[in-house]
């Protein structure tokens, strides 16, 4: 009879092995940087901040931090995981050098931020061209979702304050381009705000929308082909008026607060007027109906606004609000889109829930905590987070297919980026050899082949 030694095999642990690369799957992100020309664009944008006789390029330093964040890092020192693998990531700056660059960029104020954002916008247009039918504008329309994010602070940081949820931290506004049901989404704006900033502050929504529009290709920076979608925080007179201002003419779909006037109007809607809500694919949404309101509810709002309300049976255990009616949960939104059935418009607005997935991915990619003290430093960090999220969106869009395109950052890290490989140099060329028994080796190698087949940036 053999004695059991436990559920897992016993192994001897030793150090000193050579030729093995950890986080080897991150070569997917490195190749994405190379094929999109992001390294060249960021390097050129930050060239004014490169000191004479400097060893490390500021653009490379910033991208290294973004790569570390994309791989799961949450502070500047996590760039050390890249420094340990020079065969894949090249020379990586020391921690003091990284910190000095962040301080320098923060001290430059809006000038450095504008340079980084201009480089991102330039690369984004090229990436969408590379993506072709997988690009978010493939159907001729771009949807931008705006939403606030609460970031908890565990220490006294500049502009950290009590939030409306009785926590302590910051309240930035993020904007994401929706990739639709077959993809994820990419960030196009990040506006850092104090924790006590309001959820429906029109000036902040306008500034975030301006930053988002500047990130889009020029053809989408104005006109009805660009849809701005928000929750009820964007349902203000000033923001809606700004969206449709002469020369801008944007489409919008903004959530609306259920006021007493709307509540009373809903009670007067005849039963025959309600239309069944629909699901993606055209099926009927069980227990949900939509109707369009007019009359006094639209007084004071811009001409052409349509107010659509949905009533739905609450899920078991949900508590009704005082604005609900007849045991139904009420939600409302406003839009200026015409010629589309209200059920389809309501489905389009409901799909804004995908923005919550983007926010969850952002929290898992450096936005769980702002690691620096000064607001200017944390605004630079927010730009780094956006670059990391862009890489995590562009790589699947260009290289992955099927359900893998829908994987969120945590799953990408677990299945692809964490894969180890052997680094072999033959004929003055480096080769990464992934093990055959790793379940997603084929996904990694196929994605690399698709990226390498793309044309090199000019």
Image (tube, rainbow, N blue to C red):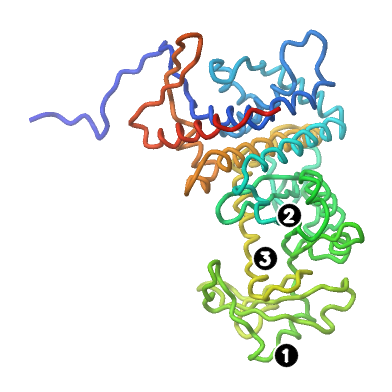
- Quadrant for residue 265, please give it: bottom right
Q: Secondary structure at mark 1?
A: loop
Q: Secondary structure at mark 3?
A: helix
Residue 9 spot, x, y in % from top left: 26, 28
- In the foreground, 445 or 240: 445
- In the foreground, 36 or 20: 36
Q: Residue tagged by mark 1?
A: 268
**Residue 273 vertical position relative to residue 229 in the rendered view, above or below:** below
Residue 414 spot, x, y in % from top left: 46, 37
- Quadrant for residue 3, please give it: top left
Spatial CA distance of label 3 from label 1 is 24 Å
Q: Residue tagged by mark 2?
A: 146
**Earlier-in-chain disc, 3 versus 2:** 2
**Residue 418 vertical position relative to residue 81 in the rendered view, above or below:** below
Quick one: label 1, few (<14), some, or many (20+) residues within 10 Å? few
**Residue 308 vertical position relative to residue 245 in the rendered view, above or below:** below
Residue 118 spot, x, y in % from top left: 80, 36
Image point (70%, 88%), residue name: 269
Quick one: label 3, few (<14), some, or many (20+) residues within 10 Å? many
Spatial CA distance of label 3 from label 2 is 12 Å
Spatial CA distance of label 1 from label 2 is 32 Å
Q: Which mark is residue 349?
A: 3
Query: Could you tell whether 430 is left or right of 267 in the image?
Result: left
């Amino acid at each position: 009879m053999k004695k059991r030694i436990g559920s897992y095999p016993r192994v001897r642990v030793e150090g000193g092995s050579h030729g093995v690369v950890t986080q080897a799957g991150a070569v997917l992100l490195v190749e994405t940087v190379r094929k999109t020309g992001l390294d060249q664009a960021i390097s050129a944008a930050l060239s004014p901040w490169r000191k004479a006789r400097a060893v490390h390029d500021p653009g490379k330093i910033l991208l290294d931090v973004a790569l570390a964040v994309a791989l799961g890092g949450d502070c500047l020192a996590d760039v050390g995981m890249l420094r340990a693998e020079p065969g894949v990531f090249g020379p990586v700056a020391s921690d003091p050098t990284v910190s000095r660059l962040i301080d320098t960029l923060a001290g430059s104020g809006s000038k450095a931020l504008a340079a980084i954002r201009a480089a991102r916008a330039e690369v984004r247009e090229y990436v969408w061209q590379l993506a072709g039918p997988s690009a978010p504008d493939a159907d001729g329309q771009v949807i931008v979702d705006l939403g606030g994010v609460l970031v908890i602070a565990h220490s006294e940081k500049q502009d950290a304050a009590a939030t409306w949820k009785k926590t302590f931290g910051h309240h930035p506004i993020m904007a994401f381009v929706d990739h639709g049901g077959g993809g994820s989404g990419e960030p196009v704006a990040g506006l850092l705000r104090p924790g006590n900033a309001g959820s429906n502050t029109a000036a902040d929504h306008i500034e975030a929308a301006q930053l988002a529009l500047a990130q889009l290709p020029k053809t989408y920076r104005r006109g009805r082909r660009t849809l701005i979608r928000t929750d009820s925080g964007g349902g203000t007179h000033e923001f809606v008026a700004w969206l449709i201002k002469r020369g801008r003419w944007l489409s919008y779909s903004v959530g609306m607060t259920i006021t007493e006037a709307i509540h009373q109007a809903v009670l007067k809607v005849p039963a025959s007027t309600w239309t069944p809500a629909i699901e993606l694919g055209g099926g009927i949404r069980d227990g949900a109906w939509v109707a369009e309101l007019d009359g006094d509810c639209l007084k004071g709002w811009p001409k052409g606004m349509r107010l659509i309300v949905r009533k739905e049976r609450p899920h078991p255990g949900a508590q009704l609000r005082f604005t609900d009616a007849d045991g139904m949960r009420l939600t409302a939104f406003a839009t200026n889109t015409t010629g589309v059935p209200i059920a389809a418009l309501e489905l389009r607005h409901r799909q804004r829930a995908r923005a919550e997935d983007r926010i969850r991915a952002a929290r898992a990619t450096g936005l769980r905590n702002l690691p620096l003290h000064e607001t200017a430093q944390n605004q630079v960090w927010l730009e780094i987070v956006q670059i990391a999220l862009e890489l995590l969106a562009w790589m699947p869009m260009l290289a992955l297919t099927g359900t893998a395109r829908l994987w969120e950052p945590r799953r990408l890290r677990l299945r692809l980026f964490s894969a180890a490989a052997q680094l072999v140099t033959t004929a003055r060329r480096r080769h990464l050899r992934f093990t055959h028994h790793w379940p997603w080796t084929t996904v990694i190698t196929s994605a690399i082949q698709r990226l390498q087949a793309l044309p090199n940036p000019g």
